[in-house]
Amino acid sequence: MAGPSASDKPGDAPKKVGQDTARTEEFVALLAEHREDLFRFVLAILPDYVEAEDVFQRTSVIMWRKFEEFQPGTNFLRWAARVAQFEVRDYRKHRGRERLKFWTNELVDVVADTWLQNDDLLEQQRQALGPCLEKLSPRDRELVELRYTSAKTTSKEVAEKLGRPLVTVYKALARIRRVLYECIERKIAPDRR
């Protein structure tokens, strides 16, 4: 790596290092936040787990190299998915074509586009879920938290913990899911028009 040039000012180097560190931290944070979704995307467009892992790792390296092209404040997952899509196409071109003959570039593009369209809807639903959960009664919110945020707690375990009959817990959860679904649909309906 070359040292500072004669035209560099004494204060430039530390600022650059600081900027690099901040940008590195931003990349690592974004990748950590979206890692699982990005891997699911790769697996959707390259339906072989081992190959998908390989392409995901290569995609991560390429995303780091191209991270300066990412515009802060935009959708990182969408940007990363497009990078991954091109990596899958490149992988097929050089290595994977013989194993997945039916899996054409056109099919990769259709699956990728469909996934990205559905991801937008899922993100809208995730954003609407928080305010809808807040509208639940404290008792209903507790039931949701016990069932869905505790580590793999079954409905039977929730019923035992709350001292309620299992059928009552099932009915309450079904009612709560319906209420949440309707609330989410009302919140995102204006965005679909």
Image (spheres, rainbow, N blue to C red):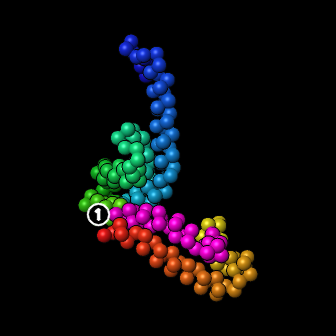
Q: Residue at x 39, y 62 (%)?
A: 119
Is 22 situated above or below 35?
A: above
**Is residue 139 highlighted in magenta?**
yes
Q: Quadrant of the N terminus?
A: top left
Q: Is residue 105 left or right of residue 148?
A: left
Q: Position of residue 5 (x, y in %)?
A: 39, 15
Residue 89, how many percent across, how many down?
Answer: 30, 53
**Which range is magenta?**
117-145
Residue 108 quadrant: bottom left
Picture quarter with the C terminus: bottom left
Q: Is residue 193 magenta?
A: no
In the visual, does 116 lie left or right of 132? left
**Whole-percent x, y for residue 170 in the image:** 61, 83
Q: Is residue 81 visible?
A: no
In-front residue for pair 162/188: 188
Q: Which residue is mark 1?
A: 110
Residue at x 59%, y 85% (from the top left corner):
171
Q: Residue furthest toward the left?
A: 106
> In the rendered image, which quarter is residue 174 located in?
bottom right
Q: Which residue does the image show at 69% across and 80% down from the upper left?
A: 159
Viewer-closest of 39 and 74 = 74
Mark 1: secondary structure: helix
Q: Position of residue 181 (x, y in %)?
A: 47, 76
Q: Amino acid at mark 1?
A: Val
The residue at 51%/78% (across/down) is 179
Classify 10 Å Cα crowding around label 1: few (below 14), some (14-19), many (20 and above): few
Most common SS among magenta residues: helix
Please tell me which residue lies in front, 9 or 69.
9
